Image (tube, rainbow, N blue to C red):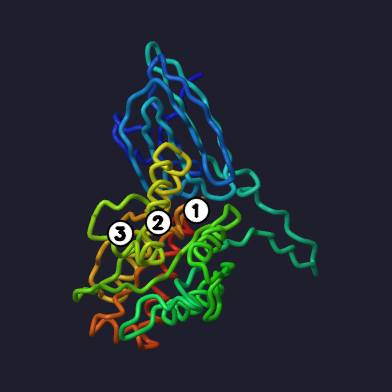
């Protein structure tokens, strides 16, 4: 069996793993294998997973944004390499192994499905074509704190700002056909016990939804300002620990929940599926952070990892956004205004929609 002529645009060098090509109607991934390499392929509705044993390659996290593929990640473990390919809707997978002397290649084509590309027959005159049934995207928005827990207090009260932003964001996403679930829609808590409250919020980040965004307002003992976005992981910067403990409930409770979340992070290092989800969370965090900084001109405090309890067990892309500092004399006053809150909500919506559309 011979390889079809490679007519697309080559996006990676011959040393890349995989080598990638874009063609009309399909995206091709070519994996150069050693003779001893073994592999397994599994597919879910939105992810193609290929696990290799007996090969050494580097980790990678690459946006593709072709009509068939959104991105791929190469995750390297001690005795295996796993490639997670994030698929766009209505695609089919075809694969073949090509032998050429001592060379061996796994060729995976991600094609637009026949159902997606077929031209429908025109409806009889006088009849409207049936509306397609598409599964709506579902986004969970978590307005941080609420009820007995005010959160940060300065020129604004955190629980009031986060709820207002969540309601604005819900309206913007619903206009785009997105289904939105709020963890709270009024000044209330899910439980007076903080650990239970955070746990109930976290449970909403389940596999029936597409992504989870927790909204917060920052504070600092010293003058600080800016926007930062987190996805789950270990604290790489010790200076962040006090902030994480505060958002996880504060005091002894916050320290305990932070320690529990950190132990989850250590376990995730050994969970390849969770690692893939964290990479998607990282991508979502960059989209939202970039949109917020561009729209507001605020100080860019970056995308970081931290063990926030509310996103510790998410099996969907999940992030926590700190939209500004409540106690900064300028930023705190900006957060008081409806115009600035609307700007923040619009920017978050743009970042979320960009992630859901898998495009630039």
Q: Relative to 296, is 64 on the left or the right?
A: right
Q: Name the secondary structure under disc 3.
A: strand
Name which residue lies at 46% across and 54% down. 317
Label ID, residue 256 = 2
Distance in Å between CA atoms under marks 3 and 1: 18 Å
Label ID, residue 314 = 1
**Is 173 located above or below residue 138 in the figure?**
below
Label pair 3/1, CB-CB below 8 angstroms? no
Q: Relative to 78, is 45 on the left or the right?
A: right
Q: Name the secondary structure under disc 1.
A: loop
Name which residue lies at 71% across and 64% down. 131
Distance in Å between CA atoms under marks 3 and 2: 24 Å
Mark 2 packing: few (<14 Cα in 10 Å), some, or many (20+)?
some
Q: Name the secondary structure under disc 2.
A: helix
Which badge, 1 or 2, is on the more N-terminal residue? 2
Name which residue lies at 52% across and 39% down. 48
Examine the image and state in which quarter residue 242 appears.
Answer: bottom left
Confirm whether residue 253 shows in the render. Answer: yes
Mark 1 packing: few (<14 Cα in 10 Å), some, or many (20+)?
many
The residue that label 3 is drawn on is 303
Q: Nearer the viewer, mark 1 or mark 2?
A: 2
In percent of width and height, residue 13 lies at 29, 34
Which badge, 3 or 1, is on the more N-terminal residue? 3
In percent of width and height, residue 83 lies at 43, 36
Q: Relative to 233, is 95 on the left or the right?
A: right
**Is 53 located above or below residue 347 in the figure?**
above
In percent of width and height, residue 200 lies at 55, 62
Confirm whether residue 182 shows in the render. Answer: no
């Amino acid at each position: 069996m011979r390889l079809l002529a490679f007519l697309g645009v080559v996006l990676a060098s011959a040393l890349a793993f995989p080598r990638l090509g874009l063609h009309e109607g399909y995206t091709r991934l070519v994996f150069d294998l050693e003779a001893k390499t073994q592999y397994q392929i599994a597919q879910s509705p939105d992810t193609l997973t290929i696990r290799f044993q007996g090969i050494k390659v580097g980790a990678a996290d690459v946006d593709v944004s072709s009509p068939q593929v959104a991105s791929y990640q190469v995750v390297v473990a001690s005795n295996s390499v796993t490639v997670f390919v994030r698929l766009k809707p209505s695609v089919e997978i075809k694969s073949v192994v090509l032998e050429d002397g001592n060379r061996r290649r796994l060729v995976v084509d991600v094609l637009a499905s026949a159902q997606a590309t077929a031209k429908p027959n025109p409806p009889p005159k006088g009849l409207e074509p049936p509306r397609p049934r598409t599964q709506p995207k579902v986004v969970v928005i978590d307005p941080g704190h609420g009820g007995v827990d005010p959160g940060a207090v300065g020129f604004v009260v955190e629980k009031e700002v986060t709820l207002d932003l969540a309601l604005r964001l819900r309206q913007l996403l619903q206009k785009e056909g997105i289904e939105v679930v709020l963890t709270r829609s009024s000044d209330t808590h899910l439980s007076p016990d903080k650990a239970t409250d955070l746990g109930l919020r976290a449970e909403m980040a389940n596999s029936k939804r597409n992504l989870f965004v927790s909204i917060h307002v920052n504070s600092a003992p010293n003058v600080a300002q800016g926007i930062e976005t987190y996805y789950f992981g270990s604290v790489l910067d010790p200076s962040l620990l006090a902030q994480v403990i505060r958002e996880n409930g504060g005091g002894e409770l916050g320290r305990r929940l932070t320690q529990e979340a950190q132990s989850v992070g250590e376990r995730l290092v050994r969970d390849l599926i969770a690692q893939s989800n964290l990479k998607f969370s990282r991508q979502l965090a960059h989209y939202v952070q970039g949109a917020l900084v561009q729209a507001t001109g605020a100080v860019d405090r970056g995308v970081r990892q931290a063990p926030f309890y509310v996103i510790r067990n998410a099996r969907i892309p999940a992030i926590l956004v700190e939209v500004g500092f409540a106690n900064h004399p300028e930023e705190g006053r900006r957060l008081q205004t409806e115009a600035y809150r609307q700007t923040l909500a619009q920017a978050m919506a743009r970042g979320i929609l960009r992630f859901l559309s898998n495009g630039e």
